[in-house]
């Protein structure tokens, strides 16, 4: 009813405009249809915030009237309407209440409780264990297992992570994974990415959950593999109950077992929940702001060791955005990624399988490519006049050009080999495939050696000018 009222308002002004000038009927009609369909599409939003919408419709109305009066083609773009919806998105009451009240409660109750009560070592132990369980359930379960299908897990493991992820209170698996797949698909897009870093720290960290933004509505079409899962269906349907059962039921039960229900509820319940929330949120905010970009500069995602500590290894976010199906985020053996180690340990125990990885050659290629970009940006900053450039930089410039040409040749060779591999495998009989594989393995190893040599040469070139390249 209210939505209808809102839709009717601009139609009234259009009618007046049509009376004033019959030649404008077509333009106004088109405009009305466009606005009507746009408003219809967002009828839910509009109905929920009818008051604020009604207050703002005159602005749109005025714009349409002036467009019509000026005889210009109406230009209320989709983007403009979407931006309007962003500005007037209604409050998302339940998440907003949880996300605002829990940190406040934790900030007041935890210090008070610790000052007035003695907390036993087992309760601290439960707090630690719940931190690990909840944090790893989000990264190992929701993220790498369900959202990216980076490996397969035994149902026991999958359900253990599902309960842990429910303890984290970050939405059902359907919501979490649908949103995350959209984040990867439209990364940084302010209109589509649900937690776009382009909308600033606050929005990407927590703001995106406080209001019903258009980019935060998911239709679950991108998670067909998850929507057919019976257990996930139940978790989604009874999510509120699951959250209460996990955060009050399980936490109190464990508290009873260690002999301190209230202490466990304060530390392993409330404090653990708030810390886990914000550590996870860092991935969407800080991991898109601070750190290096060794693999790609096509998006804002960064690699950051410090953030990897808080985020169970998810801090290597630049790698993750480039190679999202890899079960590792910290791809180097020495990079701190407890989620990767957990998955590896589970696979050793026979509880995880089909661990997906990107091959070393592809990874190295991305890295060397980025190093060339870095070298080029150095060269671009040099003075225009060749006489102003020092001897060392002259040499650097020539060396980079030479190396880049050689690198391009290697990459072409690699592409040709990939095409040849497909052809050979297609034409060969199954029993001879292993021979083909041996030949190809040898060829790939030769190209990998060449790429590593380019990497070394680049490092030397950077060293010569006193600059330390990223890798
Ligand atoms: Zn991201
Ligand atoms: Zn991801």
Image: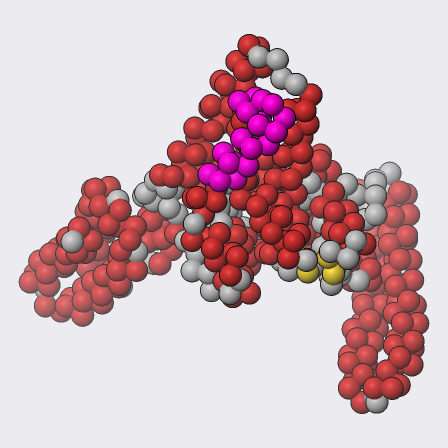
Say which of 327 and 306 sits in front.
Answer: 327
- Residue shown at the point (64%, 34%) measured from the top left: 131
Q: Residue furthest top?
A: 116
Q: Main secondary structure of the magenta part?
A: helix
Q: Please give left or right for residue 426 compared with residue 221 in the image.
A: right
Q: Is residue 438 above or below residue 262?
A: below
In percent of width and height, residue 105 lies at 47, 23
Q: Is residue 112 visible?
A: yes
392 in the magenta segment: no
Q: How many numbered discs, if any?
A: 0
Magenta residues span 244-264
Q: Is residue 225 above or below residue 279?
A: below
Q: Is residue 294 visible?
A: no
- Residue shown at the point (86%, 82%) measured from the top left: 433
258 in the magenta segment: yes
Visual colour scheme? secondary structure
Q: Quadrant of residue 289?
A: top right
In percent of width and height, residue 406 lies at 86, 64
């Amino acid at each position: 009813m209210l939505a209808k009222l809102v839709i009717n308002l601009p139609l009234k002004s259009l009618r007046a405009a049509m009376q004033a000038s019959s030649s404008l009927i077509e333009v106004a009609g088109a405009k009305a249809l466009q606005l009507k369909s746009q408003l219809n599409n967002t009828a839910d939003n509009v109905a929920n915030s009818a008051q604020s919408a009604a207050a703002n419709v005159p602005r749109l109305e005025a714009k349409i009237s002036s467009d019509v009066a000026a005889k210009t083609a109406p230009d209320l773009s989709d983007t403009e309407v979407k931006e309007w919806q962003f500005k007037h998105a209604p409050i998302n009451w339940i998440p907003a209440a949880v996300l605002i009240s829990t940190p406040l409660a934790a900030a007041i109750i935890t210090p008070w409780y610790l000052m007035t009560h003695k907390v036993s070592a087992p309760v601290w132990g439960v707090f630690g264990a719940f931190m690990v369980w909840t944090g790893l359930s989000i990264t190992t379960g929701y993220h790498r297992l369900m959202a990216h299908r980076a490996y397969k897990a035994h149902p026991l493991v999958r359900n253990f992570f599902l309960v842990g992820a429910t303890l984290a209170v970050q939405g059902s698996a359907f919501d979490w994974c649908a949103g995350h797949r959209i984040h990867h698909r439209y990364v940084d897009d302010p209109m589509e990415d649900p937690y776009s870093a382009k909308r600033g720290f606050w929005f990407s960290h927590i703001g995106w959950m406080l209001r019903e933004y258009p980019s935060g509505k998911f239709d679950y079409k991108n998670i067909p593999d998850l929507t057919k899962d019976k257990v996930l269906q139940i978790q989604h349907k009874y999510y509120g109950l699951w959250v209460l059962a996990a955060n009050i039921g399980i936490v109190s039960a464990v508290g009873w077992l260690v002999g301190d229900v209230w202490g466990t509820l304060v530390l392993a319940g409330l404090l653990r929940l708030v810390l886990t929330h914000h550590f996870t949120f860092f991935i969407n905010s800080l991991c898109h702001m601070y750190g290096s970009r060794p693999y790609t500069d096509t998006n804002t995602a960064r690699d950051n060791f410090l953030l990897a500590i808080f985020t169970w290894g998810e801090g290597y976010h630049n790698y993750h955005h480039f190679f999202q199906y890899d079960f590792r985020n910290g791809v180097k053996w020495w990079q701190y990624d407890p989620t990767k180690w957990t998955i590896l340990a589970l696979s050793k125990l026979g509880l995880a399988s089909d661990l997906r990885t990107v091959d070393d050659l592809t990874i190295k290629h991305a890295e060397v490519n980025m190093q060339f970009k870095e070298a080029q940006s150095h060269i671009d900053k040099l003075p225009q006049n060749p006489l102003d450039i020092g001897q060392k930089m002259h040499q650097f410039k020539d060396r980079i050009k030479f190396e880049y040409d050689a690198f391009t040749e290697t990459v072409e060779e690699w592409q040709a080999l990939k095409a040849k591999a497909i052809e050979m495998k297609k034409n060969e009989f199954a029993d001879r495939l292993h021979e083909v594989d041996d030949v190809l393995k040898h060829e790939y190893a030769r190209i990998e050696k060449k790429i590593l040599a380019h990497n070394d040469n680049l490092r030397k070139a950077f060293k010569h000018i006193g600059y330390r390249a990223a890798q």
